Amino acid sequence: MSEAEAKQIERMKALLTAQKAAFRAERHRPLDKRKADLDRVADLCRKHADAIAEAISRDFGNRAKQESVIAEIAFVIQDARHAKKHLGKWSKPRRVGVPMTLMPGSAMIRREPKGVVGIVSPWNYPFQLAMAPLIAALAAGCRAMIKPSEYTPAMAELMKTLLAEAFEEDHVTVITGGPAVGEAFTKMTFDHLFYTGSTQVGRLVAMAAAENLVPVTLELGGKSPAIVTPGYPTDSAAKSIGWGKLFNAGQTCVAPDYVLTPKGTESALGEAIIKVAAHQFEDAATDDSYTAIVSDRHYARLNDMIEEARAGGAEILQPEHDADAAKAARKIPPTVVLNPPADCRLMTEEIFGPILPINGYTELDAATEYVADHDHPLALYVYSTDKTQADRVLDNTQSGGVGVNINLLHLSVPDLPFGGIGASGQGAYHGEAGFMTFSHERSVFRTGKWHPSRLLAPPYGKMYESVAKKQMK
């Protein structure tokens, strides 16, 4: 560990202490202040939209501004607006019934902020995936410390500057640094830790948090399948799947990771997706609307996956492109891999790039069994003109979320909880689910000065016998 990292770790420990003190001084932040907090987040998005998009593009080598606007900046603005609109309803105490045997009395559930939360955000959507959890935390009345990915340093520094202008550091602060700082961050005594990233690192985060019994939300990933059912129009499936796969060059946790389609239709679907790609991008190598791969290491990994599948006998489809220019720009052209070997990395690892394996199935049940036999994915997509058929896929699989005849966009519905299951994550956020993630439901039972329960104390007599008899029925 370097001297600079050691100093950064000491600083973030001091900031955690300061935030905890500030939270104790204002345990129940008034709703009008919370709404103002949400407005500040939305305002900084509007005011600095160009700078945010430029910083993300710099980190990637090239990221289409349109992608950053719609998937990061506008998303955060809408998320903040939705939380502000519904905050009064979400935070209202809820009364619950009291059994006759416990009367007289009243019971209620108070939704209270957990305290100081830690947010670890990834590189693929470096602004949205830091700010959306922050919005949920601020809505709940919490204070927050954010640790962005070291793979997107320009965005991390800009976010640090913008949030420092909008909030006092004992309310919201950003911690930058490499793996040593990140590891120390996950070991701190937060009141809740929120992590978005890979399943492999998620396991380490969960273990680190467990040392202090810090509750965690893990937003992970996994291989999200797209199942095309018999009879679904090939062109319609290709347009939807192609768009979802190529957005952000496939560097999206809910991007379709592989396709299962009726046997004999693999080539037609693959060629249709390549046609979609050629229409969207004149040349992936030189088109600024096609996003680059975030790092040399990730670029090399994706190329190795393609070559492994090719060596295993898979057919590789790509649109025409300038291969040398693509390499220089660190771009992987849109790639379809037909029937890759089952044991190749494309079929065993989350791809996180613009490479789409397509495999054929004989019966729909075989497709759902394949999905069910593997780790539960973060998302599942089914394309079907028959609702019964689509429901059959849902009934026989498990996933964090589902899109029927669409992909990606289920996470944009504010009131749909977004999260994984099993290896793809635990916990959820967005909308009220996010508010609840950072809230504690505190149970309260009230009675007057005297309550009949006092008659149930030893020595046990007729009152005890009467009450016990009723409760045992």
Image (spheres, rainbow, N blue to C red):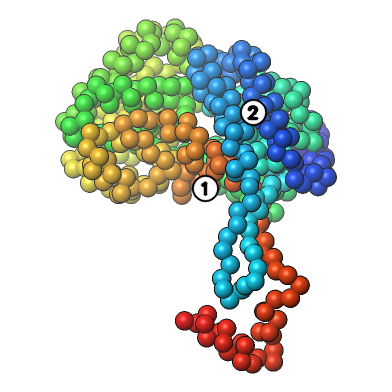
| Residue 155 visible | no
Horizontal side of 18 relative to 90 (left or right) equals right
Q: Position of residue 79 (x, y in %)?
A: 57, 30
Pointer 2 residue: 150
State the residue in front, 428 or 186: 428
Q: Position of residue 215 (x, y in %)?
A: 63, 51
Tell me if mark 2 has few (under 14), some (14-19) or many (20+) residues whose alpha carbon lies within 10 angstroms of its own: some
For the point 37% across and 7% down, the residue is 282
Q: Position of residue 269 (x, y in %)?
A: 24, 25
Task: Say the numbered circle drawn on residue 145.
Answer: none
Identify the secondary structure beneath mark 1. Answer: strand
Q: What amino acid is found at the position of numbered circle 1 in the picture?
A: Gln
Nearest to the eye among marks 1 and 2: give it.
1
Q: Quadrant of residue 159?
A: top right
Q: What amino acid is found at the position of numbered circle 2 in the picture?
A: Glu
State the residue in front, 246 or 30: 30
Pointer 1 residue: 426
Q: Compared to 1, does 441 lie above or below?
A: below
Q: Position of residue 206 (x, y in %)?
A: 60, 49
For the point 66% across and 56% down, the residue is 442
Q: Quadrant of residue 285?
A: top left
Q: Earlier in the sequence, mark 1 or mark 2?
A: 2
* Callouts 1 and 2 close, C-beta under 8 Å: no
Identify the secondary structure beneath mark 2. Answer: loop
Image quarter of the N terminus: top right
